[in-house]
Image: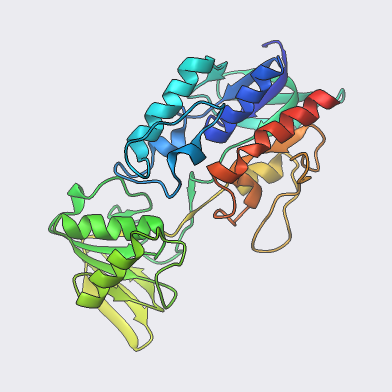
Amino acid sequence: MADQYDLIIVGGGPIGLACAIEAQKKNLHYLIIEKGAIVNSIFNYPLYMTFFSTAERLEIGDIPFNCLAPKPGRQEALEYYRNIHRYFNFNINLFEKVTEIKKTGNSVFEISTDKNLYKSKNVVIATGFYDIPIQMNIKGEELPKVRHYYKEAHEYAFRNVVIVGANNSSVDAALECWRKGANVTMVIRKNEINNRVKYWVKPDIENRIAEGSIKAYFESNITEIRDNEVEIETPTGKVTIENDFVLALTGYKPDLNFLENIGIQLSNDELKIPTYNPETMETNVEGLFLAGVVCGGMQTHKWFIENSRIHANMIVDYITSK
C-alpha cells in the first residue's frame, strides 16, 4: 500500500499532465496513473495526423511549443509532451490501468489498479474518449477486415476500401488512401461532409468527390459486411460493391460505464453528460473531479486541449482552497 496522496490523476494525456503541473506548483503529493504510454491517445493517432489547433494552443505549463509548420503533427506533439515530462519530471506510473475507485468511510478514495492499490484525498478523471469505438452494430462488423482505427495508408494501397463517416479522421483516411492508390468509397450518414472538418482539407475531399476520384454515398448506411463485398442502403435503394477493407471511423466515446461505476451521475439522455460543477470541475461525488474531453460525455467535440487546459487550474485551486 502506497502513502496517501493529496491527488491521484487518472490519465496521462495533455490535460492529465496539466493537472500534475498545477499540483506540483502547489506542492501537492500527487500521482498520475496512465494505462499506456505518456499521452497515449496522441500516440495512437494516425501517423501523419495534423492538429486543427496551432502549436501555442496545445501548450501546457507555460512551456513554448515550437513548430515550423503552421499546424503541428502527431510526431511534433509527442516530442513536445515528452519534453514536458523531462522538464517537470512527473510522478507518473505508465502502463498501469485503474480498475476501480471507491470512497471509504473516512472520505478517502481507494484506487485499485492491475498492479497496486492507492489511497488519495482527491481524484481527477482525465481519461479522454479515444479508447472505445462507436459500433455500427451490423452483421459482419466483427470480420478482421473491419478497422475502427486508422494508422497509415500503405496497407490499403491498390485495394477496395470503404470508409464510414465524414469527420476529420474519415476524410484524412480517405484522401491518404486514395493518394496511395486505393479505390476509396465513402459511406456518409448525412448529406454533406461534416462542417467541423479542417478548413484546409474540406475543399480537397469535396473536389475529389465531385470529380469522381473518390466515390461517396450520402444519406447512406452500411447494412452488411461480407468477406469480399459490402451492402449499402442508399436513398435510391441497396447497392452491393466489392470490398477488401472497411474503415469504420464512426467516432469514439468515453468509458461511460467506468464513470457510472465510480458513482458519477450521467444525464438521462443520449448525450450521457457527467454531472459536475463547471466552476470547480467537482462531480456529484465530493473530491472526485473531471478534466478534459471526458466532461462532454458523448459530445466529444465540445472539449479539447486548447479549451480544457483551464480545468487543471480550476481543480487544483479548489482543492488547495479547502
In this rendered view, identify the residue nearer to me: 177 or 161: 177
In this image, 39 relative to 98: left or right? left
Residue drawn at the location 53% of the way across and 46% of the way down: 129
Furthest toward the bottom, the residue is: 236
In which quadrant will I find the C terminus?
A: top right
Q: Position of residue 187 (x, y in %)?
A: 34, 71
Tell me where residue 42 appears, x and y as whole percent.
42, 38
Image-based side of 244 in relation to 216, left or right? left
Q: Is residue 84 visible?
A: yes
The structure residue drawn at horizontal position 29% and vertical position 44%, both measured from the top left corner, is: 48
Q: How many numbered markers are drawn?
A: 0
Q: Quadrant of residue 25?
A: top right
- Residue 125 or 320: which is nearer the viewer? 320
185 is higher (above) or lower (below) than 22: below
Q: Which picture quadrant has residue 219? A: bottom left
Residue 103 appears in view? no
